[in-house]
Amino acid sequence: MQSTNRWKKPATLTLALCAFLAVSAIDLREAGLSVAAAQNNLKPKTVIKPQRPVIKVPKTSPGRFGTAERSAPSKSTEPSAKRSGTVRRQPDLPASGAAVPLPIPRPVLSFGLPAIIDAPTEERTILAVIPEDAVDLAAVIADRFSVDLLDEAPLPLISARALRVAVADGVSRDEVVRAMSIDPDIIAVQPVYLYVLQEESGPSARAETVGLQYSVARLGLPKAHRISTGKQIPVAIIDTAADFQHSEFGETETASINVSGFDPVPGSHGTAIAGILAAGSTLVGVSPDAHILSIQAFAFDEDGKPFSTSFMIAKALDQAASAGARVINMSFAGPRDPVLVRSLDALSLRNTLMIAAAGNNGPKAKPVYPGAHPETIAVTAIDSAGRVFDGANQGDYVEIAAPGVAILAPAPGEKYDMPSGTSMATAHISGVAALLLERQPDLTTAEFRAILMSTAVDIGSEGRDPAYGAGLVDPVKALASIRQAVD
């Protein structure tokens, strides 16, 4: 009896220890998942109830996918096919049918980045990315997922092809995106995000005196132009089309490309940006001798408001790279688009100086892209008195300030406007970039950023701050630092 009790206690302790370890293992697993989610900036996604007609989605195990990290489909008796061989066909996804269990809910990842759920998107459309050489795959993808192929375009900048497709009425776009995300023939998939220009229109004006251009004196442009005029530096403007028939561009080297898929219609925004850069009649452009490439990536909706999409901007960035642009002006804003991010990363490797608007959503608004991308220069706007624009975004990503309130600029039809916004400020910094590149053609983004930061006039709180960044750009001092290095 004594011997039995002696073994009973260890057995009880053993059971208790096993129970404790089991509970601890669950806690540790949940903690690990929470840490992993936090590191990947993932948020729990609510389960979307299937809408009729329902798309059957193959089961898959949760995980990351993109170009390097992909989720493998569940085990199948079907032999695998190599990408270079016969295209592997997923099970047919009928337009209607009985519902099947969906995969474990998770954010869709495109190029390793979670899709943005609350950003404005084009209705019913999806942007799918496939290998660059898979020219015959677009029709297969459209048939496989029962979607309409609206457009496709090669994107050599990121070694891919972009497909813009639309789901049928009554079909859940989110379900189709989830199904596409586990297709082995698709590199990345996401909604088609919308982008808007960062401008607030001002009253129409006639350019009767250059004195209305307060930015000329504020930036010391006459003195800066004795050092550099941006001669022969190619600057791409991704915007509405610019009206190069305006007399302000009589002596300017210009070219135009339309990637919007809509008719080429000059817009006031693109014309103003081009004028700030290179006007040369009544007005004074920041870089009057630069070569200006207008890339129309914005169209107009039924109300006449300009808009763009992930698909248009991806094509525009690719065209800018193909044209050899050394500076790209991006006076627009929107969500962090995975395809956009991948394109910006590729451009940064080419030492392309990318200048972007900080945004016009107000001081408490979240960061916007492409301005918040680490390799772009995010620009805020100030008025003639040096005060920051009321509508400008603020944050740690804001790097430099430039004139952007009531800027006298050309408008289509031989007119002039006085628009405001971080868009206009962005064009001033793009012009300064062209001035510096004439003096130092191999200037890198890191070097350009360092020059801007070190020569800026501190007009906000002491040191760099979320409203003004490093302060007001000083082209003369920036050029002086380049000249000393070159001389």
Image (cartoon, grey):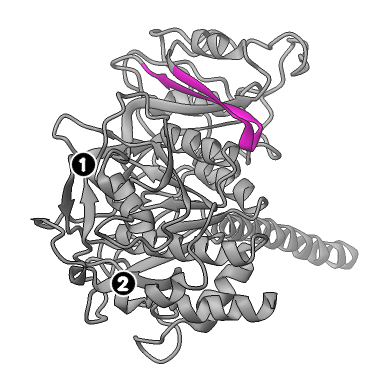
Q: Residue at x 68, y 62 (%)?
A: 20
Q: Is the magenta stretch mostly helix, strand or loop?
A: strand
Q: In this view, does 44 lie above or below 458?
A: above
In primary-sequence order, the first of circles 1 and 2 is 2
> Percent from the top left, x then y, of residue 347?
60, 48
Q: In this view, does 382 lie above or below 252?
A: below
Q: Residue at x 49, y 41 (%)?
A: 107
Residue 161 belongs to magenta span = yes
Q: Quadrant of residue 219?
A: bottom left
> Percent from the top left, x then y, of residue 116?
42, 45
> What quarter of the picture does the C terminus occupy?
bottom right
Residue where numbered disc 1 is placed: 412
> Percent from the top left, x then y, of residue 114?
51, 45
Q: Residue at x 17, y 52 (%)?
A: 416
Q: Give the range drawn in magenta.
A: 151-167
Mark 2, other Cα within 10 Å: few <14 / some 14–19 / many ≥20? some
Residue where numbered disc 2 is placed: 216
Residue 482 belongs to magenta span = no
Along the line of sight, which residue is nearer the eye, 131 or 40?
131
Q: Quadrant of residue 364?
A: bottom left
